[in-house]
Image: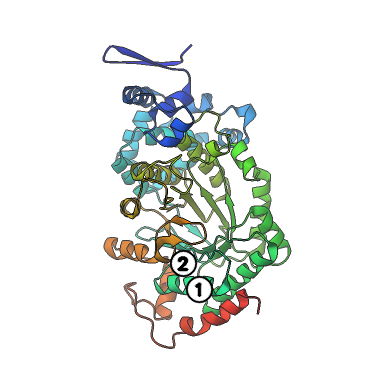
Amino acid sequence: MPRYRTTLADQVFAFDDLKQVMAHASPARSGDYLAGIGAPTARQRVAARHVLADLPLAVFLQEAVVPYEDDDITRLILDGHDAAAFAPVAHLTVGGLRDWLLGDAATPEVLAALAPGLTPEMAAAVSKIMRNQDLIAVARKCRVVTRFRDTLGLPGRLAVRLQPNHPADDARGIAASTLDGLLYGAGDAVIGINPASDRLPVLDRLLRMLDAAIQRFEIPTQSCVLTHVTNTLRLMEAGAPVDLVFQSIGGTEGTNRSFGVTVALLDEARAAAQALGRGTVGGDCMYFETGQGSALSAGAHHGVDQQTCEARAYGLARRYRPLLVNTVVGFIGPEYLYDGKQIVRAGLEDHFCGKLLGLPMGCDVCYTNHAEADQDDMDTLLVLLAAAGVTFVIGVPGADDVMLGYQSTSFHDALFLRETLGLRRAPEFEAWMRRMRLADDAGRLLPPQAGHRLLQDLGAIAAVGAGS
């Protein structure tokens, strides 16, 4: 018996349960149709949005889209719900929340206080009835500041993850990409390598190489080798210089099981990293990556649409007060986000939901080569996210990741954003660039002079990475 109904133009539309309302209200995307849960017609989508807009927010505390008894992420979300923080909006419907978020009462301070009172499903629901400009306007008001060796998320700032990947983990190639990024003023979010190998000696060598560079040049940033959390725990036990613990996470227990991750394991890793005390201005030491489609890919979506599953991953992430979270928005491929239009929409949704839930949200603005997308689509999303106050973006040489084999964004793309929109780097990193004579007092890049320390000494850093 359908639980939710509405009538439009004398036609009755019925929905079996809350997750069907959510799925049918989602903007069209290939992953939901692959799962067999997308709205069959545009009229059905409009009807689902009418139903969703009229639903009281309290419904999401009473009807779980993934059963409480079957899923530890559901239990974490509902057991951790902050009723006092929720109280100011508890009387609202989803549509009422949209109007309130867009109004003057929803200041940055009020939104920060509200975040623990919103469940991921509430955030996903309101995003489904918002235009792109709504997603941008509200996300821009959400301020989430985190710290390790520098301060990220301040208003008017845009950070960059310097991603010096190499298909053979070659130290000279990584050093060259790192130098390229630093000379462009990238790296204030993190210098983070996706390793080609999972062998512990290789991972240890890469960590020591990055740490040597940060220490030699006194760079106020953090390093990360993006390996599985169990490898990072073993590296910490062996005395490796670990700054951040990385892990890919999903929005259901089954998705995380497919990643080899549990809440208890993440708890253990955070405690181990915090015990090292390597941060200088703060102790936020976790880095998570997510992406729409991971739950469906793992066969663990429970019939829930991919955007709601993604938002539920943020419910797990905020347990750890991470330094960084980013959605790798187009990485999984066109089976989940078919073209540039779907990728742009998904990127704005993910950023909005993450920021609304209190996360320091970044985005890997990316696509695979077999998607119906190109770099112009990425330029569009990049500018929209910067307008929305994105915490950080990715920088790889030439926007082409030669290790992971996908198209992302480059160091000069981030420079374009900073120069066009007047965005600055993290303050500690910007001060370092002035000391190194890489930027002037206004944050504008200066050409490095012959004999600059970075140009002279990075070869020695590569030698550390090569095991010399």
Residue 187's disc number: 2
Q: Residues within 10 Å of mark 2 (few under 14, many from 20)?
A: many
Q: CA distance from mark 2 to mark 1?
A: 9 Å
Determine the image quadrant of residue 233.
bottom right
Marks 2 and 1, the one that precedes in the sequence? 2
Tell me the element at label 1.
Answer: loop
Q: Amino acid at mark 2?
A: Gly
Residue 460 in the image: x percent, y percent? 57, 82
Determine the image quadrant of residue 102.
top left
Q: Residue at x 56, y 57 (%)?
A: 284
Q: Amino acid at mark 1?
A: Ile
Tell me the element at label 2.
Answer: loop
Name the foreground residue: 194 vs 111.
194
- State whether residue 243 appears in this view: yes
Q: Residue at x 30, y 38 (%)?
A: 131
353 left or right of 218 in image? left
Of the 4 image quadrants, the one containing the C terminus is bottom right
Q: Which residue is mark 1?
A: 219
Residue 120 in the image: x percent, y percent? 48, 37
Extreme-right residue of the structure:
238
Extreme-front residue of the structure:
370
Say whether marks 2 and 1 touch (CB < 8 Å).
Answer: yes
Q: Residue at x 40, y 42 (%)?
A: 346
Name the foreground residue: 34 vs 271.
34
Q: Residue at x 57, y 73 (%)?
A: 171
Q: Residues within 10 Å of mark 1 (few under 14, many from 20)?
A: many
